[in-house]
């Protein structure tokens, strides 16, 4: 039976994990327990903004910590009626089932062994954990997202002027140019109105010539295509019909090209090599991974969806390992390039708002929630669930979210350049529409 101090309220202790970020700020993950004596064990990871260690001021006890979960815990403790202290989780893991040993690790193991009574943090509710421990009602809903480095703009190329039209359109224009030139030459040969005396004032043998020789026919069509005209004018009805059709064709092509060229010159092209999980699964150039021994890793390992099964086989066999022990290491690998980090959307939102070099790719891969974990059959689960529901109805959890995720001054000044701001080349189906 857990030890309780002789006070009017049960005295709880909180197990926590210290996390260290690249800027020196420590972060924690919280776990509550009844135990009177507390062991201090350090674990390096990143849990911003859920639990953080204050790096300024002389604080002691629970006042050393701040963050979303700390504020939430204070509200719940006030409503339910308990006090708490903070301690560490021994192995620094959330908890995942090891099929080789048949054992759980991390926070889940502590709750199963009754060494802790509450786990407060970014603890994901899933089937495997729910089968061995209990969870309260979720206080936050989320899903798995893809974190990727913002692509850089491609430098201008020598033949960038050809981008507004698809390659097949350029080929069709070239073929039409040759065909119309030859047609004009042939039709002019059969029409008597295109044959003229080159020197009408010269007395001598009558010599007639056709102005639309093969070279002149090509010159007439290219001059029209370039909207420059030429000194050749068709006289016969047949050649005028051919010329009129060509003029109308060039009007459509030039107008379409000019309009789409303006889009290519004014819209910044932010092209990402991947757009969703299917793109990740279908390639091997870009590595991708998850947090080691976390719920995201469990999701891919146990998924029956073919795309996610394929992704899990890739991650499991990839060398060097694509799994990272901390969020910080995963983010650093993303910033280095050619790596996508599969992580929970709430943490991703926080990171993306503070680093303009990172972005989210695609939508959510699943839907789940964060809950406060307790040992199986704990009497505190229902009381805390009621407190969470009340806080949600009052909007206090949303206010806490806005406080820690959207605090002014912490977010980067990201210019709203749409990730889909790519002007598409005109294809055959677009011409004439």
Image (cartoon, rainbow, N blue to C red):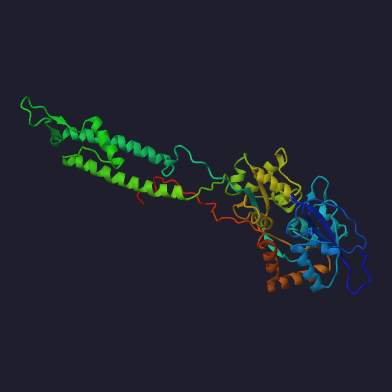
- Is residue 266 shown left or right of residue 184? right
Task: Examine the rendering and report whether any part of residue 324 can be seen.
Answer: yes
Task: Examine the rendering and report whether any part of residue 95 can be seen.
Answer: no
Quadrant of res 35: bottom right
Q: Horizontal and vertical percent for residue 268?
A: 50, 49
Q: Residue furthest right?
A: 6
Quadrant of res 376: bottom right
- Is residue 381 shown left or right of residue 213? right
Q: Could you tell me which residue is drawn at 48 percent across and 50 percent down?
A: 267
Q: Residue furthest front?
A: 57
387, above or below 424, in the image: below
- Is residue 226 shown left or right of residue 166? left
Q: Horizontal and vertical percent for residue 191?
A: 15, 35
Q: Horizontal and vertical percent for residue 347?
A: 69, 56
Pick the quarter of the image with the N terminus: bottom right
| Frontmost residue, 168 versus 52 | 52
Q: Could you tell me which residue is drawn at 38 percent across and 39 percent down?
A: 170
| Frontmost residue, 430 versus 271 | 271
Quadrant of res 363: bottom right
């Amino acid at each position: 039976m857990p030890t309780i101090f002789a006070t009017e309220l049960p005295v709880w202790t909180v197990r926590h994990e210290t996390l260290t970020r690249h800027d020196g700020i420590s972060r924690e993950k919280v776990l509550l327990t009844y135990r009177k004596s507390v062991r201090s064990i350090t674990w390096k990871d990143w849990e911003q903004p859920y639990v953080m260690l204050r790096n300024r001021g002389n604080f002691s006890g629970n006042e050393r910590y701040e963050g979303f979960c700390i504020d939430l815990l204070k509200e719940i403790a006030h409503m339910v009626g308990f006090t708490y202290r903070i301690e560490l989780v021994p192995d620094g893991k959330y908890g995942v089932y090891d099929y080789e040993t048949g054992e759980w690790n991390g926070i889940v193991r502590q709750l199963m062994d009754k060494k802790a009574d509450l786990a407060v943090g970014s603890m994901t509710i899933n089937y495997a954990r729910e089968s061995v421990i209990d969870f309260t009602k979720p206080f936050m809903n989320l899903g798995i997202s893809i974190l990727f480095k913002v692509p850089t703009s491609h430098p201008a190329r020598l033949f960038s002027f050809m981008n507004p039209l698809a390659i097949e359109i350029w080929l069709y224009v070239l073929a039409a140019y040759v065909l119309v030139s030859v047609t004009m030459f042939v039709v002019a040969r059969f029409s008597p109105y295109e044959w003229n005396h080159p020197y009408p004032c010269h007395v001598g043998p009558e010599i007639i010539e056709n102005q639309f020789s093969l070279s002149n026919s090509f010159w007439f069509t290219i001059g029209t295509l370039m909207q420059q005209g030429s000194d050749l004018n068709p006289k016969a009805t047949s050649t005028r019909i051919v010329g009129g059709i060509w003029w109308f064709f060039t009007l459509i092509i030039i107008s379409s090209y000019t309009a789409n060229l303006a889009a290519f010159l004014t819209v910044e092209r932010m092209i990402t090599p991947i757009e969703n999980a299917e793109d990740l699964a279908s390639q091997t150039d870009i590595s991708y991974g998850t947090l080691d021994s976390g719920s995201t890793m469990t999701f891919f390992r146990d998924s029956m969806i073919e795309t996610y099964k394929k992704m899990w086989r890739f991650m499991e066999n990839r060398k060097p390992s694509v799994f990272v022990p901390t969020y910080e290491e995963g983010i650093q690998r993303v910033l280095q390039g050619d790596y996508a980090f599969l992580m929970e959307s709430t943490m991703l939102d926080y990171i993306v708002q503070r680093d303009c070099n990172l972005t989210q790719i695609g939508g959510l891969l699943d839907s789940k929630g964060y809950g406060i974990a307790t040992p199986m059959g704990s009497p505190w689960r229902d009381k805390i669930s009621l407190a969470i529901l009340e806080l949600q109805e009052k909007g206090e959890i949303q206010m806490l979210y806005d406080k820690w995720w959207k605090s002014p001054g912490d977010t980067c000044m990201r210019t709203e350049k749409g990730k889909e701001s790519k002007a598409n080349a005109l294809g055959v189906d677009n011409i004439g529409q």
